[in-house]
Amino acid sequence: MEQQAHASVTPLAIAVLALLEERPMHPYEMYQMLIGRREDMLVKVRPGSLYHTVARLAERELVSAEGVDREGNRPERTTYRITEAGRTALKTRIAEILRVPAAEYPVFPVALAEAHNLHMPDVVALLRERVEHLDNDLADVEMMNVWADNSAVPRRYWIVLPYLRAMLAAEIAWIKQLIADLDSGALEWEQFDAISGHRTSEHEHTWPDPDHTQPPPVPRRTTRNHRDAAETPQLP
């Protein structure tokens, strides 16, 4: 039960707890800090979801209300502080994520797996547009990386930036190679009627069974399951 509770600490909850580990804050200040630090590149930050997350953390006694203040005619704001239980949950959840790769099921691989349902020129055009977006994201990360380095920000606070840069660069390179394979014909594609858009080529698969009806079983390793079942280290 305790491990499940820690697993329910969402990415946004991690960000909130990490901010409160620095000092007590009210939710609007948390929102400003997350946006100002560009952490919206890592987690989806919306005012409504942030306030809901803080309320959920308070219900679980991972944070506690410290006091209420008011500035001018603005509404009252409740300041929150992280509790010892919240500090433990934060450290444990970070350790779990660092330790075991989780199946996150991003949507791009799903689209790649089913891209053969689209006309090949359309796929090429869409991938080129994606590369443009990724190039912009990469330039943004590069700028942040230079800023952090020039501002003498301790490296431990921005080690995620080189990771993001490497992931973006790898995806851009991979997609560009895929586009080249499609353009050159090295990657065979489905054929579609130019007017109706309906598929004109039949599904062609080569199975090892005589009737060519059943695919071979896909190999699966069980190492991930063994890691998942391992005991989570308890941190102070």
Image (cartoon, rainbow, N blue to C red):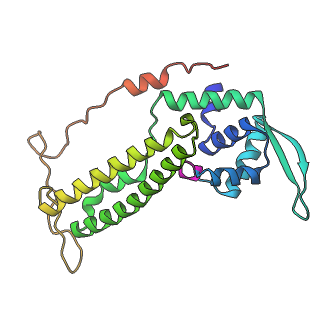
Residue 110 x %, y % = 36, 52
**Relative to 29, residue 81 above or below:** above
**126 lies left or right of 54:** left
**Residue 210, located in which quarter of the rendered image?**
top left
Q: Please determine whether, in this image, residue 26 is positioned above or below residue 73.
A: above
Closest to the observer, 137 or 225:
137
Stretch of the chain drawn in magenta: 39-43
Magenta region includes residue 95:
no
Figure check: 49 above or below 94: below
The image position of residue 212, as x and y in percent, is 12, 46
User: What is the quadrant of residue 20 in the picture?
Assistant: top right
Q: Position of residue 136 (x, y in %)?
A: 42, 61
Q: Is residue 179 left or right of residue 205?
A: right
Residue at (22%, 59%) from the top-left corner?
A: 179
Which residue lies at the image location 83% right of the left edge and 45% below the top edge?
79
Q: Is residue 153 left or right of residue 188?
A: right
The answer to whether one can see residue 1 in this image is no
Drawn side of residue 127 relative to residue 100, left or right: left
Screen quadrant of the N terminus: top right
> Splitting the image into 4 quarters, where does residue 57 fall?
top right
* Residue 42: in magenta span: yes
Across and down, in percent, residue 26 comes to: 79, 48
Q: Residue at x 49, y 27 (%)?
A: 99
